Amino acid sequence: MDAIFLQVLNGLDKGGAYALIALGLTLVFGTLGVVNFAHGALFMLGAFCAVTFQFMMTASKQIKDESITFFDAYKEVPYLEIWFGHVGTVLIDWVVPLSIIMAIPVMLLIGLAMERGLIRYFYKRSHAEQILVTFGLAIVLQEIIKSFFGANPIPTPAPEIVAGSANIGALFGLGDSVVYPYWRLIYLAFSGLVIFAVFAFLQFTTFGMVVRAGMADREMVGLLGINVERRFTIVFGIAAVVAGLAGVMYTPILPPDYNMGMEFLVLSFVVVVVGGMGSLGGAVSAGFLLGILQSFASMNEVKAIIPGIDQIIIYLVAVIILLTRPRGLMGRKGVMED
Amino acid sequence: MSDLKFTRRGVLKSGAALGAAGVAPSFFVRNAWAQDFTNNPGNGSSVVLGFNVPQTGAYADEGADELRAYQLAVKHINGEGDGGMLNTMTPLSLKGNGVLGKKVEYVTGDTQTKSDAARASAKRMIEKDGAIMITGGSSSGVAVAVQSLCHEAGIIFMAGLTHSNDTTGKDKRKYGFRHFFNAYMSGAALGPVLEARYGKDRNAYHLTADYTWGWTQEESIKNTTEALGWKTTAAVRTPLGAGDFSQYITPVLNSGADVLILNHYGKDMINSLTQAVQFGLRDKQVNGKNFVIVVPLFSRLMAQGAGENIKGILGTTNWNWSLTDAGSQAFVKSFGAEYGFPPSQAAHTCYTQALLYANACETAGTFYPCEVINALEGFKFDGAGNGPTEYRAADHQCFKDVLVVEGNENPSSQFDLLQVVQVVPRAQVEYDPAIFGGELGTCS
């Protein structure tokens, strides 16, 4: 029972990341009709917003390191600690949550620049061409990040106060071995909050209503005299912010490196296809579903019956869903069927 | 019909004359056949070495450090700079004027930490750039693949960072040499320290990278810990580059294990260790004992990536910049003055490999690979870090002291991440080469 509970929790937490990325992918596909293979790179750029902010906050004065006598070496003392003492140390400790403030405008600008500077020229081109150009863009962004930050993962820890694990087993009357990292619980709550915010924005605002109408029938909304394109550009920016925030908050879980976006991109595309192309609800549901299935497939008891199932479960489910429901779990008729 | 007379004296004379004529070529034209080998530099003024390191991909930082070390080695071999380990290594034939009077030049290739890419770049350096020796790499999969290619091409391969038993075990080759230690040696060195720290009654849970290095390391460490009396609760294979290991870590929580052994390296190790610590494993108590995490293969670059999580974790390493022997100090001083930070274990092994190859050519008096191999086989040397060292002729594995290290709880500098717990003497990590099988093959 303990093991099952832990794997459900693990799947939800993993699914939260899949759902956030897949949500942005679906938004862009549903509004602009663009298959954006650079979306994983946006997740990675978000993570590197946190890394950059960490570098800024830990900008240091170099002091000669007397402990090294072989050559001239220097140790670094952050200016924040020199200027503000303990307050400076606390600010550095809280760098990941604080970097959200920086990531929102930065990711919005990156999203808008990407859409206006490149993506819009490919609206009327085939999906194959869109995939090629966005995939190329993702590689360029990766290489830029690698040239600045190197190839190794960069530790970006969570604040000390939430660095440990919560004894959630006690809350549910389970054993003491049922513990779960605080930050992963925070990530799960954060993904739920962002998903709710995006849905509320689309459901309860005029802007959202126009976007939804545009997703259903872009031509008709245009004929009503509404500038749909401008709104869709903003939607691209919002999708970039969602992916970026998912990346920022993921940094304490996975020390970021330049390739982290690619690792999530393929899985997120499978999530979108399983959920149904263009379906926001489908993307979110499929994200959590596949996260949970992946976790269960990694259990030793399951792998003892079907060795290697943890490596293929997501793709196996995708094949089964597409065979039985070709439009995915919640796919709409007519989407990507022309 | 001719009238031939055979006398005993006549037959003996003819036999001696024929014998002398038969032997003569090997005295007078030995260099003539020796010249007929791949990328013979001939009468040219320079010789080209091929540095095949990961310049992109997950181990690019390690590859960059390897390349720095090779560039420094070339400088020293050519008589530039402060000479580094050339001042401490004994015996030494190099004179600081290149190799056999020829200036050393180099070309580089990118292994991308992929076997096929590594083979392609090694092939290019051999066929197009005329490299007479290939060296480098940061993965056992790559090392085994490139070693095999070099053997077929008649080119010596001086392996970089490769820790699988297979490299000098079942996949060993006559043209391949490894200075780095291996998984068996890690286990043999780590065992007594694990026993002293954690006792004989433990239950170990392995998470293992699913490729040649991971398998051999898991096997070696399991053999060691089970010989101590530890039980193996489970050994779970994880995909290379999994990123999020949480689904493999959660089953550890209620498995009854009180030791987690991470047979991961590089990015995988950074991620799995970080996540294991987040799941509270380092602070956990099982069966009345403190839960412990062990990382059998460590490097300082990985310790940097893992940050605070590495503190107090035991493992082994081939070499560490904090060693105080003359060879290590000379290398650290030279590397630090050139680049402003100390070298990694990958840099040390690559620098040493370049010097060893150059020295073997100088000793043999030729670049002819078979003669160079003869010079390397059984070569005993000192002053290159890790104490007296020998390139065992039977499997081309270097034997030297192994370091058991621990993530430093109180680092005195940003580089002081690993603390040497014990220098395990070479005799404790030696083994019979027959246990891993394989054939070196012949030099042709």
Image (cartoon, rainbow, N blue to C red):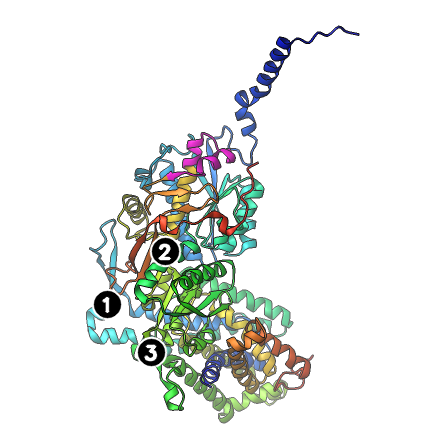
Of the numbered discs in the image, which one, if any, rests on residue B237? Answer: none
Dot 1 amino acid type: Tyr
Question: Is B285 left or right of A259, judged from the image as shown?
Answer: left
Element type where label 1 sits in the image: helix
Dot 2 amino acid type: Ala
> Gap between marks 1 and 2, in whole Å?
43 Å
Task: Assess whether mark 3 and mark 1 are in contact (beta carbons under 8 angstroms).
Answer: no
Neighbourhood count class around disc 1 (C-alpha, 10 Å): few under 14, some 14–19, many 20 upward: some
- Residue furthest toward the right? B1
Q: Is residue B26 above or below residue A50?
A: above
Element type where label 3 sits in the image: loop
The residue indicated by pointer 2 is B189
Q: Give the extent of the magenta segment.
A: B359-380
Residue shown at 30% from the left, 65% from the top: B197
Task: Assess whether mark 3 and mark 2 are in contact (beta carbons under 8 angstroms).
Answer: no
* x then y, percent, for residue A183: 37, 79
From the viewer's perspective, is the residue at label 2 or at label 3 nearer? 2
Residue shown at 45% from the left, 77% from the top: B251
- Residue furthest toward the top? B3
The answer to whether dots 2 and 3 both sit on one chain is no
Question: Is B409 left or right of B159, judged from the image as shown?
Answer: left
- A268, B202: nearer the viewer: B202
